[in-house]
Image (cartoon, rainbow, N blue to C red):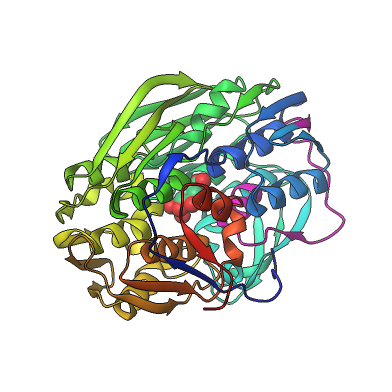
Amino acid sequence: MSSHGPAQKMTARAIGPLKGVAEVPGDKSISHRALILGAMAVGETRISGLLEGQDVLDTAKAMAAFGAEVIQHGPGEWSVHGVGVGGFAEPEDVIDCGNSGTGVRLIMGTMATSNITATFTGDASLRSRPMGRITDPLALFGTQAVGRAGGRLPMTLVGAADPVPVDYLTPMASAQVKSAVLLAGLNAPGQTVVTERVATRDHTERMLRGFGAEVTTEVSEDGYRITLTGQPELSPQTITVPRDPSSAAFPVCAALIVPGSDVLVPNIGLNPTRAGLFATLQEMGADLTFENPREAGGEPVADLRARYSPDMTGIAVPTDRAASMIDEYPILSVVASFAKGQTVMAGVHELRVKESDRIDAMAVGLRACGVTVDETEDSFTVHGLGAGGVPGGATAEARLDHRIAMSFLICGMASQRPVSVDDAGPIVTSFPIFEALMKNLGASLSRDNG
Ligand code: S3P
């Protein structure tokens, strides 16, 4: 999504309770990985429940540009006819990953150990994000990268013709970095090792095992040490993508702060490396229950039920939980505004290099809504106003960031006065049915520029 046309202002107003069933789309992280690993297998992978958000559609297009056959059969139903590990063809044109950091970083890793050259770009948000965190470890395999100052896109990668395996300690908690190294390791002979100090989402490791690769995880004194045996033959799989807990967070949090609400969000992926928000909400006193816990497609899932919770109190979110809820701090800061007391969110420097600087985006927008927010370089604290206490009456900047746009719209559903976002366009990257789904629960969302 290099550009998505004119800005689409959207306004949320408080009306009645939110009630009903919210069927959120497929998991974004797992959807990217299903397409990429499908492209690395020999033969046809079938995927159901794929997220058809713009980020994932851009990855699907990229896999076709590298030579895989990617076909949509129906809503969420896709197949990928893969070219095998090391089988990528050189793309004829620039790969445009739109808004997606996950897409571009995982694809760079995947092509980095093939003897081909590819140039990557994206929208204004993605072109401002650091890629050195990926190209540094890829250089150890023998990959060359030339980009703009500060390691920004557009960037050209020359894949390593004779890749060597790598042993890498990730300098920041990042599943994208870990995954890029593992995906590059697929076409390197011998064992590639990546160690991370804190456990980040492990969908790549799980899915690699599912496709037949040998991947082990051991706890060492440095943290989690993941070892991949290179040059496996990956066998095509049938993958059912669970629904995205990061998308579920929006109707769940809306239900907690809109009086009288009761919302069921079925079939949500609850991989422990992703579920930190829900534990945090429960500690704040949220009425949140997990019904029918089960396993689907190698991932734990359950149905989430959220009811209006007027007595939530702020907490200090444990810093060691940050990785498991890194995408959920924007919406947590909205819930914290409707809780009593302070919610301290520390150890979250990574939020400054997401689709936007999410600490700044939330702090500025919440202050405009009448909430006091303190920030440091790697933390922010929301001074909650209690149930019904947020004045609202502001227009927040979405900054090309889907989660910032959705967070402020949820804020407007429970604020005393409406809250607008200047551009709801980016929501299509991860949650294309957000507007329809929230309206179906009873929310008031309008594009009336009001
Ligand atoms: C993702 C990893 C996280 C997360 C992003 C998805 C992934 O990014 O914020 O939305 O699918 O691997 P980092 O690796 O930068 O933490």
| Front in this rendered view, residue 49 or 234 | 49
Q: Is residue 274 left or right of residue 140?
A: left
* Residue 361 percent location from the top left of the image: 40, 73
Q: Is residue 142 visible?
A: no
Quadrant of the rendered structure where residue 218 is?
Answer: top left
| Front in this rendered view, residue 386 or 249 | 386
Q: Answer above or below: position of 39 versus 299.
A: below
* Residue 312 percent location from the top left of the image: 17, 51
The residue located at (83%, 52%) in the rendering is 91
Verify whether residue 80 appears in magenta: yes
The residue located at (61%, 72%) in the rendering is 8
Quadrant of the rendered structure where residue 14 is?
Answer: bottom left
Quadrant of the rendered structure where residue 232 is?
Answer: top right
Q: Answer above or below: position of 95 versus 231.
A: below
The residue located at (66%, 21%) in the rendering is 238
Region rendered in magenta: 79-108
- Quadrant (top left, top right, bottom left, bottom right) of the N terminus: bottom right
* Residue 241 percent location from the top left of the image: 57, 31
